[in-house]
Amino acid sequence: MISSCPICNVQVLTAELQRHANAHFDDDQLQTDMELAHQIALTQSTTPNPLLLPDTHQECNNLFAGDPHAQGASSSIAGSSSLQGSVLDEQVSCLLQAQLRSIVQEIQGGLMNLLRACLESEAGSSTSIISGHVDHHQSLSSEDKGWGCGWRNIQMLSSHLLKQRPEAREALFGGSGFVPDIPSLQRWLEIAWDKKFDTLGSSHFHNKVYGAKKWIGTTECAALLRSFGLRARVVDFDSTESSGPHSKNGKHAPKRVQGPMDKFLIKNVSSTSTSSEICREDAENMRGQQVLVDWIWNYFASRHSDNSDSSRRVLVSDKTPLYFQHQGHSRTIVGIQKQNGQRGNQDRFTLLILDPGHRTSDLERALRSKTGWQRLVKRGVHTLRKPQYQLCYVDPGIASSEEMEQLKTIDSILVRF
């Protein structure tokens, strides 16, 4: 008899099920199993997913290989627009059938519930605010190690949206109800570009990203989510002298935008007095760090479901996790902790982060045992040494047709250190 493993869903002989399941607690074996499960999902001939059928796969490739902008070049403007829309409709229809579910390790009880229990068990006087449901999507050495962190953060943000926001579940990924794998997300991003979302950013990739091992960032995340009508926002934190009407890479021009978080953006943050031993650069870094963590605290604190009980040590926010980008890497911020200052000392803040570079098995084991989890999840303010950071979050609701046109241009909110 054949049985399905409750951890990775691989089909094994029933007689071997217990041995196979126990092997998941071996560090090396789990990585192998997860990658094996991913390969099986892509190659198993019995699956009804049309992407695995050669004819349908080739049909999709042909659709995406064409240039919907060029095909109507010889027609009138109206005819060209109509033809382009038809091609896009066909691409979406094909992708709805072809997209694959991302392989993710299921954690019994939920990852965020385990984190909440750890935070509640800590000694000392602290308050933590965390997001609701979030699945951890780890990079795999056989698929995206070294370049896929941005895609994994999109997957983590999407896992929250699908679980916590019904309107997003209906809109995202054609209403599939699941988080797609990286190749499927790449196709969705190309469709967003063809729909004229973030045309400036798409030119950086020459409008093609499918199958490429290219790093992406917050603007690509925003463009993808906005193409489904979600109100994705980008915030720039910049301490460089060159930050101004045009960003350094020329892709986007940050500007102040009136929005729900504006009351936290324009703040008179005075530099704290420092001794002569502290150089000016260190003092500016400290100030910049505080501006960033103040914004993140106010973001999560602005909407949480535990308003009736302010004495609770761990509050659950209604806000989405934050896609957290900086030079060389990106992660997902799922909350923030404030340790109350004692004897006149300032409050201390710690970011709570899920890193795609960590293995989900290590994360789950540490959280369940309440041992060593801080090393994987907590990041102190002193670690924020980069001169520039970007965040992406999603406001509630679905954009109207008029708003969708405005969302096609990715204007970020600029916060100077």
Image (spheres, rainbow, N blue to C red):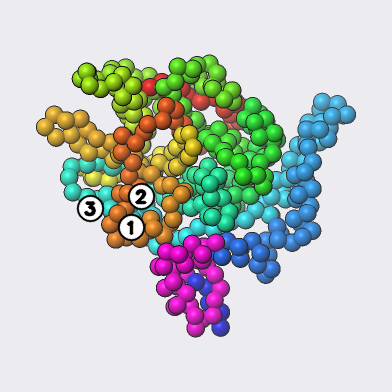
Task: Tell me the residue that label 1 is attached to.
Answer: 366
Q: Which residues are magenta?
A: 6-35
> Which quadrant of the figure has residue 43?
bottom right
Asked if residue 16 lies in the magenta stretch, the reply is: yes
Marks 2,1: beta carbons within 8 A: yes
Task: Tell me the residue that label 3 is attached to.
Answer: 121
**Apparent side of residue 48 relative to residue 244 in the rendered image (left or right):** right
Task: Tell me the residue that label 2 is attached to.
Answer: 376
Residue 235 on image: x %, y %? 46, 28
Can see residue 228? no
Q: Main secondary structure of the magenta part?
A: helix
Residue toward you, 254 or 164: 254
**Apparent side of residue 131 relative to residue 43 in the rendered image (left or right):** left
Residue 9 on image: x %, y %? 52, 68
Name the kind of residue labelled 1 in the image.
Ala
Marks 3,1: beta carbons within 8 A: no
Name the kind of residue labelled 3 in the image.
Ser
**How far is the residue under mark 3 from the one under mark 2?**
17 Å
